[in-house]
Amino acid sequence: MDKSLKSPRKDPSQNQSELFLENKETLNLNDLDSESLKSPTSDHQDVKAIWNQCLEIIRDNVNPLSFKTWFEPIVPLKIEGKQITIQVPSQFFYEWLEEHYYSLIKKTLTKVLGEGAKLVYSVVMENSSTDETKTTINLPSSPKPIPKPSYQVQIKSSYESQPFESNLNPRYTFDNFVKGDCNQLARAAALAVANNPGGTSFNPLVIYGGVGLGKTHLIQAIGNYVLANKKATRVYYVSSEKFTIDFVEAIQKDRVSDFSNFYRSIDVLIVDDIQFFAGKEKTQDNFFHTFNALHQARKQIVLSCDRPPKELKGLDDRLISRFQWGLIADIQPPDLETRIAILKKKAEDSGVELPQEVIEYIAVHITSNIRELEGCLISLLAKSSLENRKIDIELAKEVVKTIVKDTSVKVSIEEIQRIVCEHFEIPPDMLKAKTRKQEVVTARQIAMYLCKELTDSSLKTIGLHFGGRDHSTVIHACQSVEEEMKKSEKFRNLIESLRRKIEFNSK
Ligand SMILES: Nc1ncnc2c1ncn2[C@@H]1O[C@H](COP(=O)(O)OP(=O)(O)OP(=O)(O)O)[C@@H](O)[C@H]1O
């Protein structure tokens, strides 16, 4: 039976079972007719209907992606009086909700169930002995470590006492990994794992994402953190290629059992780029057994790959199904704000101070790969030092040109404004006016984004062409457009068709 309740964090002295309404916090509840909401409930009322009412309110107060990620997976289990029990898929999930949505959930439940509403979380834990079994645990008022199972297997081998190289690059730490919307979940999960290797429900932790977006950095940061904070002693980082090469060599030298025993003596095994296991059946088979042994012994496994595990071709289904046991988190290309933050951090780490316009110029033009961003900064510093030139926008343009394709089409800001306004059927002057009408705001943001993409103008210059707005308004506009493009195919198509039209007209 679930009986433990989560108390409000800010006031631990309060009765743990109560949810309190703090009037000072704002919540968009105005659209909801409170009369239409159910008053305090009886035992027999439908928990689903009540939870749906809650979801309606929550949906209005979070963005669609957050709603899909954090609220759709919740299963309402039961309602007893004013106490509702909801099931969440993992301990991490529960902690995330508490960390980020505590206030919203509390207010929503108070609104729907009335004062004195109570919430019980039921956390589903994957049982490590089998794929299927799930255990529901009672959740205490503050998260407790997940208990070790009674069937825990202790691996005893002579390897446990042998020293070895972790293969970690000490340069990759959490401290120098810049946080952004693009990596928020992956970074939070990595930190959780680093703090409690093998003790969270994200085992394995699988980080996936495109080229040069920080997967290796993040998974190695886990290893470095574990060692620095003495969370475990035997941490081993290996690329899937090296695992394969070593395995083949072990076969040739008839030392497969040594190979397997070594891997099974590891506390935190980090395997990079597992997509390269594709098609290598024997290696996969060995990795499968290593995975099972470590997982059963509650040792931490961290993996990275270039796409969601389900889309990995040439990998055994039973391996892919095991990757789903823990948490799969992606890293997306960084938005403009994160690119600027990364460049600033890297410049700071190199002991140089770059002019803001140089940082913005690079961040605006190098968009999809953090390694390229880094490479550009290194080239800039090298060129400045070798040619004895000061770092300014001209030097930045020269370096960026060597990295990104030159579009060679010269486009004017006025032309972009004209074509965007023509599409939205608004006069071009509206883009410079102060109006906040939604349609004009959207047109203005799109036009600013396209100016950034298609011209060499600085953010400051672009802002000046839009009624003297400052560069931060342009950054915000570009970010909004980039985010919307990620979410909506229709929007992406619109931007692409406007881009084509502008380029065509400018030739
Ligand atoms: N969020 C970040 N903050 C700071 N530096 C970052 C961040 N993300 C990536 N980097 C840096 O970018 C470079 C490329 O990152 P990394 O090698 O981890 O990418 P990757 O996703 O593993 O790429 P690949 O797919 O090629 O293996 C590294 O030098 C890394 O330090």
Image (cartoon, grey):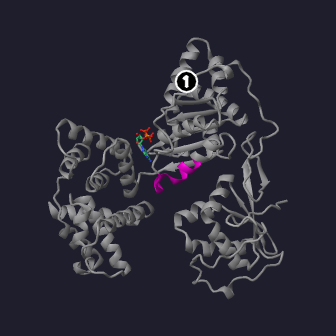
Q: Which of 290 and 62 is in front in this view?
A: 62
Q: Residue furthest left?
A: 507
Left-right relation of 195 to 418: right
Q: From the viewer's perspective, is residue 247 above or below residue 472?
A: above
Residue at point 77% right, 76% down? 116
Write down which quadrant ligand 1 falls in. top left
Observer able to see residue 90: no
Location of residue 379 by image quarter:
top left
Q: Is residue 184 magenta?
A: yes
Q: Position of residue 449 (x, y in %)?
A: 30, 64
| Mark 1: secondary structure | loop
Q: From the viewer's perspective, is residue 165 above or below residue 100?
A: above
Q: Which residue lies furthest to the bottom in this view?
A: 35
Left-right relation of 155 to 504: right
Left-right relation of 279 to 85: left
**Quadrant of the image containing the C terminus:** bottom left
> Identity of the amino acid at label 1?
Glu
Left-right relation of 219 to 443: right
Q: Is mark 1 within 8 Å of ligand 1?
A: no
Q: Nearer the viewer, residue 174 or 484?
A: 174
Residue at point 19% right, 62% down? 504
Q: Mark 1 points at which residue?
A: 165
Q: Position of residue 302 (x, y in %)?
A: 58, 38
Location of residue 38 by image quarter:
bottom right
Q: Which of 270 and 356 is in front in this view?
A: 356
Q: From the viewer's perspective, is residue 238 above or below residue 129?
A: above
What range of the chain is rendered magenta? 179-189
Q: Where is residue 485 in the image (x, y as percent from the top left)?
A: 40, 62
Q: Does the magenta stretch include residue 326?
A: no
Q: Position of residue 458 (x, y in %)?
A: 23, 60
Residue at point 21% right, 73% down? 418
